[in-house]
């Protein structure tokens, strides 16, 4: 049995091949235009806190905590308040510290200021600040600012508010 192709079917196949090759050529020709448009759009960039610097801050904070001596939790967050690293030292004083340290760091980032400043505002002229949902207004949270850019925060929860603040500031001093 022989299969015969009619001339009509062959012309149709050739026509479809021709149309497909034109479509490919048009798409290929338009790629440089799309690339040129994308290249001309300037996207913003943002400074980020690299893990190595977060580790350096945490190491300095740990050294200060050991020197006091006060054991607890130290957390470093990025500029969105997400934990980069969290360390629970041996013999941490309070179970609540695991939740408090990262929230102090996050609060410092979100308000762009020390949580000691927030605590003072709550205790003084802005008691309504305590109604801000989801924030910790306790000493021990510090924003991390590098070259004028807010890149993260450090939060500490050990035994006393003053120790928390001192340890967080010692961590920051390691990158100044």
Image (spheres, rainbow, N blue to C red):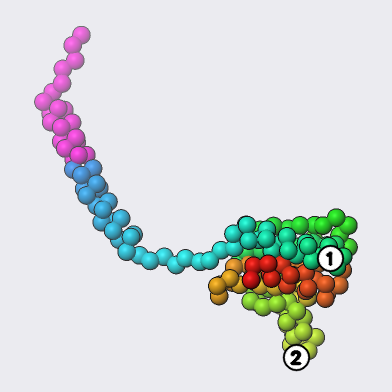
Q: Residues within 10 Å of mark 2 (few under 14, many from 20)?
A: few
Q: Is residue 31 left or right of residue 49?
A: left
Q: Which mark is residue 10?
A: none
Asked whether the viewer can see residue 1, the reply is yes
Q: Main secondary structure of the magenta part?
A: helix
Q: Residues within 10 Å of mark 1 (few under 14, many from 20)?
A: few
Magenta span has 128? no
Q: Mark 1 to mark 2: distance in Å?
A: 35 Å
Asked whether the viewer can see residue 101, the reply is no
User: Which residue position holds label 2?
Assistant: 125
**What residue is rendered at 58% in x and 71% in y?**
146
Q: Nearer the viewer, residue 141 or 69?
A: 69
Residue 85 placement (x, y as % from top left) = 69, 57
**What residue is rendered at 78% in x and 89% in y?**
124
Q: Nearer the viewer, residue 135 or 48?
A: 48
Pointer 1 or 2: first along the chain: 1
Q: Is residue 23 left or right of residue 132?
A: left
Q: Secondary structure at mark 1?
A: helix
Image quarter where the N terminus lies is: top left
Residue 60 placement (x, y as % from top left) = 73, 63
Q: Which mark is residue 67?
A: 1
**What residue is rendered at 66% in x and 72% in y?**
143
Q: Is residue 66 left or right of residue 6?
A: right
**Residue 99 image-quadrant placement:** bottom right
Residue 59 placement (x, y as % from top left) = 73, 60
Dots 1 and 2: beta carbons under 8 Å?
no
Q: Secondary structure at mark 2?
A: loop
Image quarter where the C terminus lies is: bottom right
**What residue is rendered at 34% in x and 59% in y?**
38
Q: Magenta span covers which residues?
A: 1-21
Q: Is residue 37 left or right of residue 165?
A: left
């Amino acid at each position: 049995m022989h299969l015969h192709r009619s001339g009509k079917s062959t012309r149709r196949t050739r026509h479809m091949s021709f149309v497909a090759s034109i479509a490919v050529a048009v798409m290929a020709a338009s790629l440089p235009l799309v690339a040129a448009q994308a290249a001309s759009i300037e996207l913003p960039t943002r400074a980020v806190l690299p893990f190595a610097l977060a580790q350096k801050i945490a190491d300095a904070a740990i050294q200060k905590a050991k020197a006091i001596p006060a054991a607890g939790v130290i957390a470093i967050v990025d500029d969105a308040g997400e934990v980069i690293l969290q360390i629970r030292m041996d013999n941490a004083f309070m179970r609540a510290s695991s939740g408090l340290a990262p929230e102090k760091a996050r609060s410092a980032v979100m308000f762009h200021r020390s949580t000691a400043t927030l605590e003072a505002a709550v205790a003084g002229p802005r008691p309504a600040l305590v109604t801000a949902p989801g924030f910790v207004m306790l000493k021990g949270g510090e924003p991390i600012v590098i070259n004028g850019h807010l890149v993260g925060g450090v939060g500490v929860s050990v035994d006393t508010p003053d120790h928390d603040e001192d340890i967080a500031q010692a961590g920051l001093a390691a990158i100044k």
